[in-house]
Image (cartoon, rainbow, N blue to C red):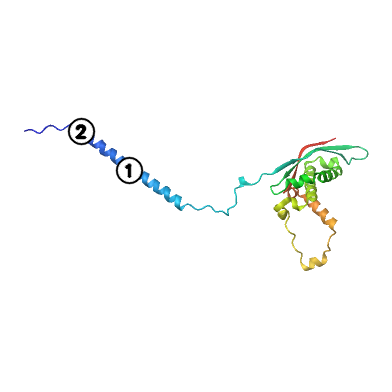
């Protein structure tokens, strides 16, 4: 009895089935290896350091404290009278206690008026004159409220002066308190950035007539 002829269609379909099974096996192996790698990374990842410094975006923002406008007479040449109309805003650092500034506002405004009224128009017209004035006002605010209003920042406001040698100490005499205060004000006026580390004065308007 003759053998029945083979089904050529079934014979031709066998190779694709084997190939598809091989692809499934390879895909399963890749998934397994990937899952194992992810698990190993999760277990071996470095732990977060609780003592690490906080990110910069978590730092406290500065506080802006606008003041009422100031109008003062300036020291004019001869009998010519000039006046200044200025708007000020205090930029307070993160460590500065804004309530301490607000509580002493009458004294602060008085001190600022005294600073402004003692200026000449010719001194305030250049940009350098305005920067110097801003530094003097910032120092005046700090003098009124005292270091207690600046929190931790007061401890880093200025480096401690170097101790003189024995020969220098013997040759130098102790300056009076008012001289030391005047020297500090002059230093702040010479270096506006140093005086504005905790309190910065921003001019919102500045008109001289």
Residue 161 lies in quadrant? bottom right
Q: What element carries label 1?
A: helix
List x then y, in percent, for residue 112: 82, 44
Q: Which mark is residue 26?
A: 1
List x then y, in percent, for residue 36: 39, 48
Residue at x 84% of width, y 57% of height:
177
Is 148 situated above or below 78?
below
Q: Residue 130 carries which label?
A: none
Residue at x 71% of width, y 54% of height:
156
Question: Mark 1 Cα within 10 Å, few/some/many (few <14, many 20+)?
Answer: few
Is 48 situated above or below 173?
above
Residue at x 61% of width, y 46% of height:
58
Closer to the camera in the image, 156 or 100: 100
List x then y, in percent, for residue 166: 78, 68
- Which residue, as the protein is rendered here, is positioned at the far right? 79
List x then y, in percent, for residue 59: 64, 47
Apparent side of residue 12 relative to residue 115 in the rendered image (left or right): left
Q: What residue would you read off at disc 2?
A: 10
Is 30 situated above or below 51?
above
Asked whether residue 189 appears in the rendered view, the answer is: no
Q: Disc 2 or 1, which lies upstream in sequence?
A: 2
Residue at x 80% of width, y 53% of height:
184
């Amino acid at each position: 009895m003759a053998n029945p002829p083979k089904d050529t269609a079934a014979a031709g379909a066998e190779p694709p089935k084997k190939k598809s099974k091989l692809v499934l096996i390879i895909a399963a192996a890749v998934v397994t290896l990937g899952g194992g790698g992810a698990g190993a990374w999760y277990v071996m990842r470095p732990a977060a350091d609780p003592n690490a410094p906080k990110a910069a975006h978590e730092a406290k923002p500065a506080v802006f404290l606008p003041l009422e406008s100031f109008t003062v007479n300036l020291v004019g040449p001869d009998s010519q009278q000039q006046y200044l109309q200025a708007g000020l805003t205090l930029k307070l650092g993160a460590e500065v206690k804004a309530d301490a500034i607000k509580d002493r506002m009458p004294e602060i405004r008085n001190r600022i008026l005294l600073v402004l009224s003692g200026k000449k128009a010719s001194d305030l017209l250049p940009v350098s004159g305005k920067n110097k004035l801003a530094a003097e006002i910032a120092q005046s605010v700090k003098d009124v409220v005292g270091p207690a209003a600046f929190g931790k920042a007061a401890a880093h406001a200025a480096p401690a002066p170097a101790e003189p040698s024995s020969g220098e100490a013997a040759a130098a005499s102790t300056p009076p308190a008012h001289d030391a205060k005047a020297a500090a004000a002059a230093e702040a006026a010479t270096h506006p950035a140093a005086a504005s580390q905790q309190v910065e004065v921003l001019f919102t308007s500045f008109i001289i007539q």
